[in-house]
Image (cartoon, rainbow, N blue to C red):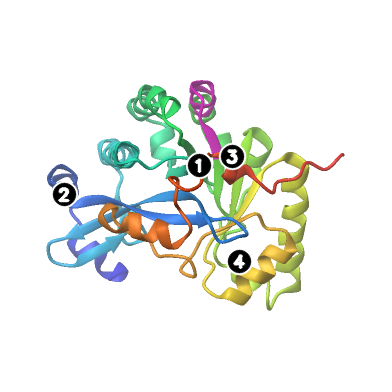
Amino acid sequence: MAELVDDWFSMDDFMSSAADGSLRSAFQPMVGGEQTVVGLEVLIRWIHPRYGLLNAAQFIDHIDSHAAFYEIARISIDSVMELIEDGISGLIFGINISEFDLANPRVIELFCRSRPAFDASSCDVLLEISESIDFSRNKHLMNSVRQLEQAGYHFAIDDFFSDESTTFPIRKINLKAMKLDMHISRSYRSSHNDLVLIKTMVYYCNLMNIVLVAEGVEERDQFVELRAIGVHKFQGYLFSKAVFREDLWSTLEMLGYDPAHEPFTVKRFWKDVYRIGA
């Protein structure tokens, strides 16, 4: 499907889908070492009338409109609010925020305006930024990061050690989490270099009190090995694919989510991160 996007993608269709509900949030659980859910990543899905269910990777590169990215941010935030109203408590929500978002004052205002509602809940929001963003090209991007930090948001680096890797955000942003790209979360088995890189990041994250999350975990042996290396949290098909709101409760229950039996707090997300004396 991805190779055909140029043939059918239309910004008018996309914006219409945002308005009529065809653009929706799905949620993929993040778990701790005990395989109990600690958070949810918010992922955009497009239910296309002709091509069916599309994930963001199939269309996001064709979006070049600030208005369209604003709609994605709005839908993501609204979906988190709905889950909080449904009674979800004690979980971290990861929302992706793009370079377009950081460059758009309307999006920054939207996140800042939404922050009090998150503060009033027992949940929290972690903003996931791509490590490929070049902050050195646009100083306004870093100003937006500072504004969001002042509003109370924490940041995570997404897809770390991807093919478009840059270390600039690590040096300039007060990160609370880093997410290993799914490819290195698998390639460490055949690449000693990648294995050493992950071990190095485990040490760095423990030193800096940063949560290290492995994405793309699909096999139990992979989970056990990464946990033994020292990775803190995990996300992937081994635990659950991304699901829509109507299927979320049953998915959470399978991953040990029972706030009525055991109070859930966002502290569970930060558990198992050890500060090492420098």
Q: Distance between the residues labelled 2 and 1?
A: 38 Å
Kind of residue at disc 3 = Lys
Numbered badge on residue 185: 4
Q: Nearer the viewer, mark 2 or mark 3?
A: 3
Kindly identify which residue carries mark 1: 263
Numbered badge on residue 17: 2
Q: Which of marks 3 and 1 is in front?
A: 1
Kind of residue at disc 2 = Ser
Location of the N terminus (image quadrant): bottom left
Q: Tell me the crowding category of disc 4: few under 14, some 14 to 19, or many 20 or more residues within 10 angstroms, Cα based.
A: many
Kindly identify which residue carries mark 3: 267
Q: Tell me the crowding category of disc 3: few under 14, some 14 to 19, or many 20 or more residues within 10 angstroms, Cα based.
A: few
Q: How far apart are marks 4 and 2 (CA)?
A: 34 Å
Q: Give the range drawn in magenta.
A: 145-155
Q: How far apart are marks 1 and 4 (CA)?
A: 31 Å
Residue 47 percent location from the top left of the image: 20, 59
Q: How far apart are marks 2 and 3 (CA)?
A: 37 Å
Q: Distance between the residues labelled 4 and 3?
A: 25 Å
